[in-house]
Image: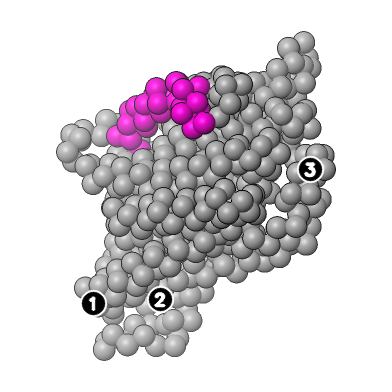
């Protein structure tokens, strides 16, 4: 229980940590499962194309890692204010306000998706500028255009799932992803290999499958939010009656988050370009690395989403101490869970790689340096959660500055220095990646330390509530 003097007692601390862990698990599990479902789409694409041919896998990885992933994550960042403002309204029992967040964000989400299509469309030109071979640029550009057609659908799906996570109904997104993965496997099988009377399209077939699945996800999510009886108290069918200026702060947070995530993904996309300079096998290997490490990273995003919700709820009742405790709990949980998974990945790295390719050259490149990119994954997971913690504090541009510094001004130059200039090859690129994510985590923790102390000074303990009454 809180003490009138504002001293944190051992009983209060123990009780709140237990509550945060329990709530983080409850909120994170469906968020994690939904993101694992999203990762499952990419894993199936990589595995099935990887068992088609290594060259087609390299082209698909080039399209995804250099341009499409940047577009997807930038769009995710631009829409990230949805979950923060939904959680704040929900934490204040303003159900109508939470519904307004979803409704007003629909045209915004669709506009973001269409904008991303326009940016992606001259993909062959972008790839030539990035010094890819004419063949890689031509085929990779064709794949990017196919994949880009699904981006508006993906943006609408994100709009719905962020709203659902903000009102503690993240499990719905997981159920939708189960259906999406079933559809994806069937479409990939038909279009990559030419079954059920469809032409054999290889990587292009996988791209068309991804686009179809993204629109399936959008339609399913929209139908659920619009028709679910349990969501009627949010009054999502009613016009939001708000001018653009009324929700400027939400968009500003999204703009900042979009730039921040774009900086991170552009840095990783640049790594894929560096891999392309090294050859087909390093380029294909880079895609395999991120499929092998994908599930732990998706777990960290799920924990981060849950942590930002807990931080937002605590701050909505002006409890700075509990917000700080929620943040520490989320970051600590990430290190614990992802750390355990890191050990398992290291032990079973060879069979995990074999899931995605039977090319002995890729295995020979990746297995000896597994410890480097696995450590990088652990700190990347932690810095993702730290970034979402800062967003939970309604930070707009600071996370952007910090991540841009770490990824653009540290990771890229160090990776180029080690991998290309010093000719350490793929190992050097992975070493540079690990250094970049460690720097990002340190910078964001320093910013969190300042914010948490400021909010604690601003908000004394709410002595009228026991820890059992606090949400």
Give whichever of 181, 449 is nearer the camera. Answer: 449
Q: Is residue 455 left or right of residue 180?
A: left
- The answer to whether the residues at label 1 and label 2 have Cβ atoms under 8 Å apart is no
Residue placed furthest toward the front: 422
Query: In which quadrant of the rendered view does residue 113 lie?
Result: top left
Which of pointers 1 and 3 lies earlier in the amino acid sequence?
A: 3
**Residue shown at 40%/68% (left/top)?**
445
Q: Is residue 220 left or right of residue 225?
A: right
Q: Quadrant of the C terminus?
A: bottom left
Give whichever of 35, 78 is nearer the camera. Answer: 78
Nearer the camera: disc 1 or disc 2: 1
Secondary structure type for disc 3: helix
Which region is colored magenta? 102-131
Q: Is residue 296 left or right of residue 252?
A: right
- Residue 346 place in picture, x, y as percent: 73, 61
Nearer the camera: disc 1 or disc 3: 3
Q: Is residue 419 above or below residue 386?
A: above
Which of pointers 1 and 2 lies earlier in the amino acid sequence?
A: 1
Q: Quadrant of the N terminus?
A: bottom left
Nearer the camera: disc 3 or disc 2: 3
Question: Mark 3 — residue?
Answer: 361
Query: In which quadrant of the rendered view does residue 244 lie?
Result: top left
- Residue 30 place in picture, x, y as percent: 56, 50
- What's the distance in space between the residues labelled 1 and 3, CA to CA? 57 Å
**Residue shown at 28%/85% (left/top)?**
6
Secondary structure type for disc 2: loop
């Amino acid at each position: 229980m809180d003490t009138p003097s504002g001293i944190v007692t051992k009983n209060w601390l123990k009780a709140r940590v237990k509550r945060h862990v329990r709530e983080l698990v409850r909120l994170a599990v469906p968020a994690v499962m939904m993101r694992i479902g999203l990762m499952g789409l990419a894993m199936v694409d990589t595995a099935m194309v990887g068992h088609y041919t290594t060259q087609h896998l390299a082209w698909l990885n080039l399209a995804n890692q250099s341009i499409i992933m940047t577009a997807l994550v930038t769009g995710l960042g631009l829409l990230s204010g949805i979950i923060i403002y939904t959680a704040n309204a929900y934490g204040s029992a303003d159900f109508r306000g939470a519904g307004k967040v979803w409704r007003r964000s629909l045209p915004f989400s669709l506009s973001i998706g269409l904008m991303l299509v326009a940016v992606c469309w001259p993909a062959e030109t972008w790839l030539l500028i990035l010094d890819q071979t004419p063949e890689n640029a031509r085929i990779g550009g064709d794949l990017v255009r196919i994949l880009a057609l699904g981006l508006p659908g993906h943006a609408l799906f994100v709009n719905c799932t962020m709203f659902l996570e903000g009102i503690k109904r993240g499990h719905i997104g997981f159920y939708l992803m189960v259906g999406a993965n079933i559809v994806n496997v069937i479409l990939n099988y038909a279009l990559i290999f030419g079954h059920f009377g469809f032409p054999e399209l290889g990587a292009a077939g996988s791209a068309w499958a991804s686009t179809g699945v993204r629109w399936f996800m959008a339609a399913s999510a929209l139908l659920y939010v619009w028709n679910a009886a349990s969501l009627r108290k949010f009054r999502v069918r009613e016009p939001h009656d708000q001018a653009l200026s009324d929700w400027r702060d939400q968009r500003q947070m999204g703009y900042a988050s979009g730039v921040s995530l774009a900086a991170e993904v552009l840095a990783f996309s640049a790594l894929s370009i560096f891999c392309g300079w090294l050859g087909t096998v390093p380029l294909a290997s880079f895609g395999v690395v991120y499929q092998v490490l994908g599930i732990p990273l998706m777990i960290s995003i799920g924990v981060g989403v849950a942590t930002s919700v807990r931080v937002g709820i605590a701050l909505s009742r002006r409890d700075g101490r509990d917000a700080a405790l929620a943040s520490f709990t989320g970051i600590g949980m990430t290190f614990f869970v992802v750390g355990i998974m890191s050990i398992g990945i290291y032990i079973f790295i060879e069979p995990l790689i074999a899931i995605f390719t039977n090319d002995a050259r890729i295995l020979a490149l990746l297995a000896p340096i597994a410890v480097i990119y696995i450590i990088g994954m652990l700190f990347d997971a932690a810095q993702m959660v730290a970034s979402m913690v800062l967003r939970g504090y309604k930070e707009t541009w600071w996370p952007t500055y910090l991540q841009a510094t770490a990824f653009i001004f540290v990771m890229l130059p160090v990776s180029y220095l080690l991998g290309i200039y010093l000719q350490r090859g793929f190992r050097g690129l992975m070493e540079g990646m690990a250094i970049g994510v460690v720097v990002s985590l340190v910078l964001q923790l320093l910013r969190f330390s300042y914010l948490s102390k400021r909010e604690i000074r601003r908000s004394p303990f709410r002595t009228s509530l026991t820890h059992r009454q606090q949400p």
